[in-house]
Amino acid sequence: MTTLIKLEILRTLRNRRYLFFTVLYPALMYVFFINAYGSGNQAGGLPVKTYFMVSMATFGAVGAVLTGNAQRISLERKSGWTRQLRLTALPGRAYTVGKIAATAVTTLPAILVVFAAGAVQGVSLSVPQWIGLAAALWLGSFVFAALGVALGYAAAPDAVQPIVMITYMAMALLGGTWFPVSGSLETFARFNPVFLYNKLATFTRPGHSLDLAAVAGLAAFFAVFVAGAAVLYRRDARRA
Amino acid sequence: MVTEVAAFRGVGKSYGRVRAVDGLDLVLRPGETVALLGPNGAGKSTSLDLLLGLREPDQGSVTLFGGTPRAAIADGRVGAMLQSGGLMTDVKVRELVELACKVHPRGRSVTGVLTDAGITEIAERRVDKLSGGQEQRVRFALAIAGDSDLIVLDEPTTGMDVSVRQAFWASMRAQADSGRTVLFATHYLEEADSIADRVLVLHRGRLIADGSSAEIKARAGARRIAFELHDADLPADVRFDEAVLRSLPGVQALDVTARVPGVRTVRIRTADADAGVAGIYRAGLYPRGLEVTGVGLEQAFLTITGELDRRADAEKESVR
């Protein structure tokens, strides 16, 4: 199983286009957004530079794991590679574990590159806060990796692309990625995993600790996505 | 001691209203090289899917080495190449073969597998940059990546040109010669004829023939007699009568054409060519340009499936 995981990681790192969009694109968006908003202003009770550093890191991470998993799985189901793998001694879960591992390897640099851009722009956090924030955002990305796997088993490649884009954009739009969510929108946003994901960063504010409600919400979403992925995987296996 | 490699017992599988496999009973024994023949839609791929546990039968049971297909695969007893087996992209051929060798419980050396599949020269190429025939060879390499007891190949030479196909057959024979049981589906009859020691013919989901290639040919009417009859050769008191030809021993099909006045071309398919030829002379006929030829497996195959189709159509007519 480790052989498959290693090879999955290797081939992901070889795919330059995918790497550009996952690792560099969020950092470019970050620079764009802080300039558009005016870097001295506030957003959601935070300096713009800090707010968008988190939201662009999560934006990049969610995009990487959603498209990476959903599209690849869907394509490889169509090509028959998943069938071929079922004729090896590998357990069925090895394939999805490999996929998730490969995307997880790319989300960490995506997060770190945005953080580096933030640090250059003058975002100042303590060392434990930097490390804690990176760890929280990296771990949170696994929730969306599970969603990506579920979507990959849900639809054929030509349908998966729009499904992923709509899901991704809707979650980002209402999750505080491009503007802080407040007022009545916030009531609904609590059922949006991206909103909860962004909330993982609140512990870096003075006087705040880790938002346990957000952690619990994400855990629930994770359980739902994993269960959905398992059901869809079995359906796919029956159809061969 | 289990002496069956694989067994289908009363296996049925439908897709909606289409009966893909219909009451299949079949046992594969160790060391056999078996060809699975049938026109498109005969149920070949479905049968192989059932054998490999990729699909579950609606009725009956499929066992591999006395257990479930999954257990046999997990034990590394089966290597398989699928018709629709996609390959991993963004990796080199060697990396993919390495993966297959490592995950196989009885994996072989990567170099050996590359050599046996004839892909040593393309080992450093990216999998997504290969031609159709090269891809087939890589798939074959995945099937022989371990020391499996049974090798299953679905349409292995599709997309290969003639010279490559010949080389591929040699690789297949090498697998069979090393004592493995080889089962392959094909629609190239030459492939079945030259490699298999047992031929199975599937038609509309049923097994309609099971035997050596020679037996199948014999069943279809082994030989063809062709000659010309010139009116000028007939004795003055004899007139040509097709019934004479039809009553020859063993005749299965008769075709008489007269393109040139006074000259008839006769083609007979017969189960007993020797008696047929003797009968022609006994009837006082003088055949010219007499030829007796064996029919190929292709002809035999068309004959067997064609007869069944006609019978099925006739039944439909009578029901109406």
Image: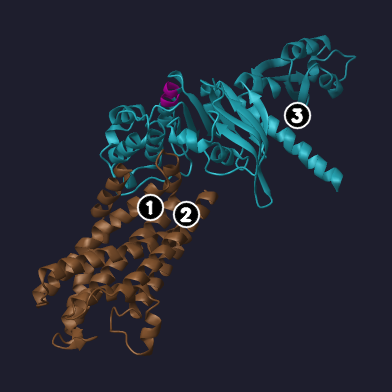
Chain colours: A brown, B cyan
Q: State whether discs 3 and 1 lie on one chain.
A: no
Question: Relative to residue A42, is residue B33 drawn left or right?
Answer: right
Q: Looking at numbered disc 1 in the image, what kind of residue is underneath it?
A: Thr
C-alpha separation, residue under disc 1 versus residue under disc 2: 10 Å
Question: Relative to residue A25, is residue B57 drawn left or right?
Answer: right
- The answer to whether mark 3 and mark 1 are in CB contact below 8 A is no
Residue at 76% x, 19% y is B229
How far from the left and from the top, in percent, is residue A27?
19, 71
Q: Which residue is mark 2?
A: A233
Q: Which residue is mark 1?
A: A96
Quadrant of the drawing holding the N terminus of chain B: top right
Q: Is residue A122 above or below residue B12?
A: below
Bin the neighbour count of mark 1 within 10 Å (Cα to Cα): few under 14, some 14-19, many 20 and up.
some
- The answer to whether mark 1 and mark 2 are in CB contact below 8 A is yes
Q: State whether discs 1 and 2 lie on one chain.
A: yes
Number of the label disc, if any, that sits on residue B257: 3
Q: Is residue A70 above or below residue A82?
A: below
Q: Secondary structure at mark 2?
A: helix
Q: State which tag comes first along the sequence, 1 or 2.
A: 1
C-alpha separation, residue under disc 3 versus residue under disc 1: 66 Å
How far from the left and from the top, in percent, is residue B185?
54, 34
Q: Which mark is nearer the camera, 3 or 1?
A: 1
- Range of the magenta residues? B170-175
Residue at 76% x, 37% y is B310
Q: Secondary structure at mark 3?
A: strand
Residue at 77% x, 24% y is B252
Return the chain for callout 1: A
